[in-house]
Amino acid sequence: MQNYSYDNGGTALASMTSAIMKRVYFKMTLGLLATAFTAVYCASSSFINFYITHSWLMWVLIAAEFGIVIGLSGAIQKMSSAMASVLFYVFAIINGMMFSTLFLAYSPTAMIKTFFITAGTFGAMSVYGYFTDRDLSRIGSFLYMALIGLIIASLVNIFLRSSGLDWIISIVGVIVFVGLTAWDTQQVKNMAQYALPEQAGRLATLGALTLYLDFINLFLYLLRFFGNSRD
């Protein structure tokens, strides 16, 4: 009887974890679709001209994105699951508005090709992070320190405009977000294993946001390698 109860409990835990992870990936996919469709729409409308000629709009959108990320990360437990989902999709749409300018620098073919490369890389690392028995905590801590260094280097290069440093930043960026994809997947899975039923919706949104950011950043860094300039 004890073995049966243990097995039954283990099966229930695995089932709940799997259900939450499916919601994570489903929401993340919807977020990516919202970003893609918004970017395409804005790039083919008068919005792109307004965005380019009014620099203040970029800063408003950046501030809105930071506000949403901080709000979801810090206060998600205080909001309803529905509100958390709405904020996530608003974030994805805002990202799409900003990404519309990518169509001015890269061809649609290059972006589609890079998207599929990103999807394959992301999928492989997320599967690894989900199924591996190895504790990735140490790797995750190192990657977050590398991410901070990457952000600082990117800010410095805005003034230096060094093509060599930009190349190094791109390589490091790919490595960092490939690793973070695996680590974040494992972290979300671990949280799902201890989540209460009423926390499932909010956790799915937070997990979707985390993996969405990994995917988007990996895409942007890979685009520097595989994207062909319109020039």
Image: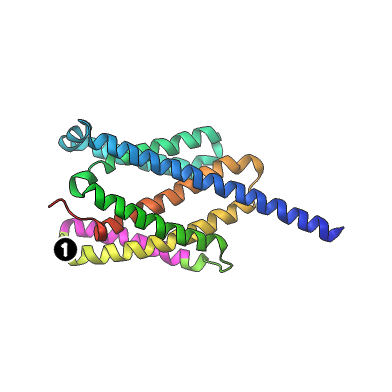
Tally the numbered discs: 1
Question: Which residue is located at x 32 percent, y 36 percent?
Answer: 38
Determine whether 63 is above or below 166 in the image.
above
- Residue 148: name its quadrant: bottom left
Q: Position of residue 47 (x, y in %)?
A: 22, 32
User: Does the magenta stretch mainly form a helix, a strand or a loop?
Assistant: helix
Residue beneath label 1, please? Answer: 162
Q: Position of residue 134 (x, y in %)?
A: 56, 69
Does 1 sit left or right of 135 as displayed? Answer: right
Instruction: Name, please, the residue furthest toward the top.
Output: 46
Question: Which residue is located at x 24 percent, y 39 percent?
Answer: 58
Question: Which residue is located at x 31 percent, y 55 percent?
Answer: 114
Does 106 sit left or right of 90 as displayed? Answer: left
Instruction: Name, please, the residue furthest toward the right.
Output: 1
Q: Position of residue 104 (x, y in %)?
A: 18, 44
Q: Position of residue 158 (x, y in %)?
A: 19, 55
- Tag 1 secondary structure: loop
How dense is the environment of label 1, judged by Cα within 10 Å: few (below 14), some, or many (20 and up)? few
Q: Which part of the image, by quadrant, shows the N terminus? A: bottom right
Whether 217 is among the magenta residues is no
Does 78 sit left or right of 176 as displayed? Answer: right
Question: Which residue is located at x 45 percent, y 46 percent?
Answer: 209
Magenta-drawn segment:
140-159
- Residue 121: name its quadrant: bottom left
The image's colour scheme reads rainbow
Residue 11 or residue 212, whichever sits in front: 11
Instruction: Name, please, the residue furthest toward the left.
Output: 231
Residue 203 or residue 40, whichever sits in front: 40
Determine whether 142 is above or below 204 in the image.
below
| Dot 1 amino acid type | Ser
